[in-house]
Image: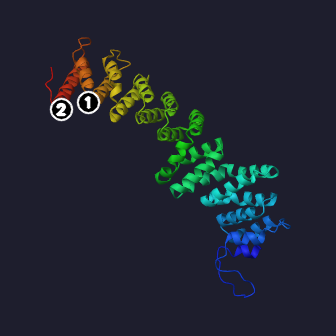
Amino acid sequence: AARMLMMMLEPRPSLDPDFGLSSSAQAEQLAAEMAVPDDPSDIERQVALAGPALSAGRALATATAVSRRHADHDTIRAIAEVLPGAARDGAFSTVREALRRLDEIALEPTLADDVVAARTALADPAVLADVCRAPATDADAAIAGEILHAAGPAGAEVLLDTYVRLAEPKRSLLRPVMRGLSEGILGVARQRLRTADPALAVAIIRTLPQLGDRRAVPVVAAALDSLDEQVRFAAASALASMPVPEAEAALVRGINHREPETQRHVVREVARARIASVVPALSRALEDINVFQRTYETRKEIIAALEQIGTPEAEKALRGFAQRTIGLGRKTKELRQRALRVADELARRRGVDHP
């Protein structure tokens, strides 16, 4: 039987006329001959002997086929032994068939514990990391998602840790998987962002908007309070890319951040995304006479942001600031003049006369 298994990768007509192995030898045919009900004790030995000559996927296909002829403790252990290797090698269709077969076998109460043990072999973090890296097609990624989902919290943890380190082509394949495991991913992200080094934290924050899940907003918004400036900046950029009211509310709070450079970065991101709903908050910040809270540079950024947003409400906010009578310092006058010029330009673009 082992000799027959070893021939599977390179099936060819036998030179020995008595041997009788055809060039189209298949796993099912071999399984039929191997699965002798009264002698199942050497199934593991047969697969192990053939292992060096078989790909992991072919070995799993053979073990699965054997289990269809005769399912017992030995055949399940044989599947468990080759299942992780097949998953790591990207033999996803074969892995799916094996998992379905295990589900069928689990209906037999005496074999249920063996099936659980076989599935547990796929929950190893090293195996799951390779599963994340292996997909080459959307179909592969879908099956990888099934494996990761079955692994529970461990699957979400490995997926996030691996995803942030992958190149974009692989990420694009796994993005639907990320969305499917959104709840678990967010749980892992919360934990990681409490302790992660800044570089990893930035990578995680940039990833969370791709989930398309508004529950990610508070996780990202909390990072605005990070002690690391780059983490705060990443959080502001991520929030600006999330078109939901909760994210806009978090950006309004960011405009009032205690640290002026973070304020300015939030304002720039609001401008880049042209978030019109934030105009009232920008107007209030521009009118703020607290020079320690609103520096000259911050106010210049706010004027530039209102220009980029360019709505009638933005123009109105600029004119309101330009007509203020409080604060007659040189820099304040300069800001008012700038605001008035921008307001006039916005009116001209809209084809209306300014007051």
Quadrant of the image containing the N terminus? bottom right
Task: From the top left corner, tell me how far across and down residue 267 is, in percent.
Answer: 36, 29
Task: From the top left corner, tell me how far across and down residue 327 is, in percent.
Answer: 26, 13
The residue sitting at 79% across, 52% down in the picture is 108
The residue sitting at 37% across, 33% down in the picture is 269
Q: Is residue 230 left or right of residue 140?
A: left
Give whichever of 260, 148 is nearer the camera: 148
Number of labels in the image equals 2
Task: From the top left corner, tell me how far across and down residue 209 is, in percent.
Answer: 47, 38
Give whichever of 192, 11 is nearer the camera: 11
The residue sitting at 43% across, 25% down in the picture is 249
Q: Earlier in the sequence, mark 2 or mark 1?
A: 1
**Considering only vertical position in the picture, is 222 above or below 34?**
above
Q: Callout 2, which amino acid?
A: Arg
Q: Is residue 259 left or right of residue 340?
A: right
From this viewpoint, is residue 195 visible? yes
Q: Callout 1, which amino acid?
A: Gly
Number of the label disc, if any, that sits on residue 349 = 2
Q: Which residue is mark 1?
A: 310
**Label 2, residues with CA under 10 Å away: few <14, some 14-19, many ≥20:** few
User: What's the CA distance linking mark 2 and mark 1?
Assistant: 9 Å
